[in-house]
Image (spheres, rainbow, N blue to C red):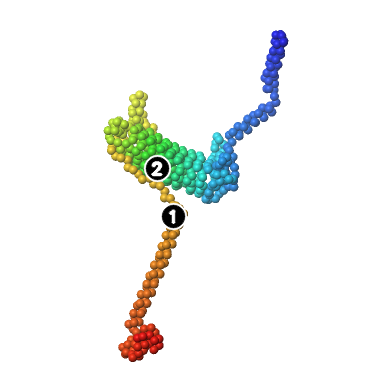
């Protein structure tokens, strides 16, 4: 092919490509409006599918999600007062509890019980469940009792939040984590935590009427505001806790005494904010940081340090109480602002608290507290039961034999007494020379040596 022929072919191909592009730009806008509507409708349907909550499956009165190898129970449609969640559905084990969203992703509405169900107040979770996921029993206001299994490991975010009827709970021994807000604004007044628990999340007990709690030393993390607005009066923090997070006991209006155990290194800002009844706090020898921890604690009387006064002054400066309180910083900021703007600046959060009468006591170890755990029912093995039964049976047999022996002895004594009485009251013919045969009791002549009746010798 000559060079001229190649050039013509190239020009023809270029013309075809340009015409195709031109047709696209010119003709596409002229397509019928129906094509655009179909395309937009398809895109809208895809968007709706993407934002629609997942629909659970139904098994009797139970709603669930099939996770492949296991099942997650997410709802109950019945109205029974006491319910036990099934341990398997369609042959698959139930290892998780969750909730389903009846709203949208933008405005979720979490539900485990139907809106019309005002009867269900007690739930038993079966063995095998390891996770109670986020929002599972969220806002179940009528829920009063929950029996959790030993297999449980995790309690998720807001799992029991707003359960106002739930006043007491025992967390099983294998649980290692309680996530943020798990019992937020619930009705808990007391809760028992297991030895082995590792983490308590942010705001777990916020706004609960909690009056009693025993935290095991295995806990290494407690999130900020975990006990915000609780009704605790006294608490001992675990030895494994390195940091007291910000606002940990803020607005605890009844809190009077706090024991910060050995091992804690840092107490963050406003840890005791607005604890108006707080009187005593014990700090450990391991403490290295505690800035601005007291604010609006008008009743504070004594702060105890396990370390010496010299060590504390090295850590917190010579004016220890000023380091521990927020008010001194507010006064400094107000003074600086006043000199700068030539006007009086007030603390927006309220009046300044006077800490000049607070007593600082050094070289005082933090008292140790005994952790309390719920009493569990006595559990007996088969061998123990057999041994106890055998012991009871042996005891009963011994009592029966003893009673029979006593009765026999009583009868013998009575017979002897009767014989003695008869002997004393009997007629004795030998006084007249007549003798009585000892064998047949026959009187015989005084001259006879043998009983005339039975032949017995005299």
Q: Could you say which disc has been placed on residue 216 in the image?
A: 2
Please name the residue shown 59% across and 33% down the image: 50
Please name the residue shown 56% across and 41% down the image: 69
**Residue 302 as seen in the image, left or right of residue 122:** left
Say above or below: 355 vs 88.
above
**Quadrant where the image shows the N terminus:** top right
In which quadrant of the rendered view does residue 219 lie? top left
Say above or below: 401 vs 108.
below
Q: Which residue is mark 1?
A: 384
The residue nearer to you, when weighing 226 against 36, is 226
**Quadrant where the image shows the C terminus:** bottom left
Q: Earlier in the sequence, mark 1 or mark 2?
A: 2
**Residue 158: percent from left, percent from top:** 48, 40
**Residue 136: percent from left, percent from top:** 51, 42
Label 1 to label 2: alpha-carbon separation:
31 Å
Q: Secondary structure at mark 2?
A: loop
Q: Is any part of residue 187 visible from this angle? A: no
Q: Secondary structure at mark 1?
A: helix
Q: Residues within 10 Å of mark 2 (few under 14, many from 20)?
A: many
**Residue 364: percent from left, percent from top:** 29, 39
The residue nearer to you, when weighing 427 against 94, is 427
Q: Could you say which disc has been placed on residue 24 in the image?
A: none
**Residue 59 as seen in the image, left or right of residue 161:** right
**Residue 242 as seen in the image, left or right of residue 10:** left
């Amino acid at each position: 092919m000559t060079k001229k022929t190649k050039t013509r072919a190239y020009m023809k191909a270029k013309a075809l490509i340009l015409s195709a592009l031109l047709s696209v730009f010119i003709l596409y806008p002229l397509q019928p409006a129906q094509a655009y509507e179909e395309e937009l409708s398809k895109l809208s349907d895809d968007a709706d599918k993407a934002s629609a909550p997942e629909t659970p499956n139904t098994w009797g009165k139970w709603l669930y999600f099939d996770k492949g190898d296991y099942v997650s129970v997410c709802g109950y449609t019945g109205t029974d007062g006491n319910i036990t969640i099934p341990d398997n559905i369609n042959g698959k084990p139930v290892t998780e509890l969750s909730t389903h969203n009846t709203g949208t992703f933008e405005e979720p509405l979490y539900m485990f019980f139907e809106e019309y169900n005002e009867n269900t107040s007690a739930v038993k979770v079966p063995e095998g469940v390891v996770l109670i996921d986020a929002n599972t029993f969220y806002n179940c206001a009528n829920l009063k009792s929950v029996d959790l299994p030993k297999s449980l490991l995790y309690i998720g975010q807001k799992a029991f939040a707003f359960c106002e009827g739930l006043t007491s709970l025992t967390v099983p021994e294998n649980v290692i984590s309680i996530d943020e807000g798990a019992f937020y604004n619930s009705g808990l007044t007391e809760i028992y935590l297991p030895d082995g628990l590792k983490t308590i999340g942010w705001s777990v007990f916020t706004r609960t009427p909690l009056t009693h709690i025993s935290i095991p030393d295995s806990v290494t993390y407690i999130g900020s505001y975990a006990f915000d607005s609780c009704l605790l009066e006294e608490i001992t923090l675990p030895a494994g806790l390195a940091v007291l997070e910000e606002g940990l006991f803020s607005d605890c209006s009844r809190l009077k005494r706090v024991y910060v155990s050995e091992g804690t290194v840092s107490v963050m800002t406003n840890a005791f904010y607005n604890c108006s009844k707080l009187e005593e706090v014990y700090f450990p020898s391991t403490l290295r940081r505690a800035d601005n921890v007291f604010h609006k604690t008008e009743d504070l009387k004594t702060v105890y340090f396990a370390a010496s006064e010299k060590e504390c002054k090295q850590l917190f400066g010579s004016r220890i109480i000023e380091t521990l309180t927020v008010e001194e910083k507010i006064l400094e900021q107000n003074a600086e602002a006043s000199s700068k703007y030539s006007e009086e600046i007030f603390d927006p959060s309220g009046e300044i608290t006077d800490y000049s009468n607070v007593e600082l006591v050094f070289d005082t170890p933090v008292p140790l507290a005994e952790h309390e755990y719920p009493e569990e029912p006595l559990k007996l093995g088969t061998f123990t039961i057999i041994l106890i039964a055998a012991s009871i049976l042996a005891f009963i047999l011994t009592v029966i034999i003893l009673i029979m022996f006593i009765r026999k002895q009583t009868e013998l004594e009575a017979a002897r007494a009767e014989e003695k009485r008869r002997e004393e009251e009997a007629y004795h013919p030998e006084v007249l020379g007549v003798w009585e045969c000892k064998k047949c009791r026959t009187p015989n002549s005084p001259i006879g040596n043998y009983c005339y009746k039975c032949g017995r010798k005299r």
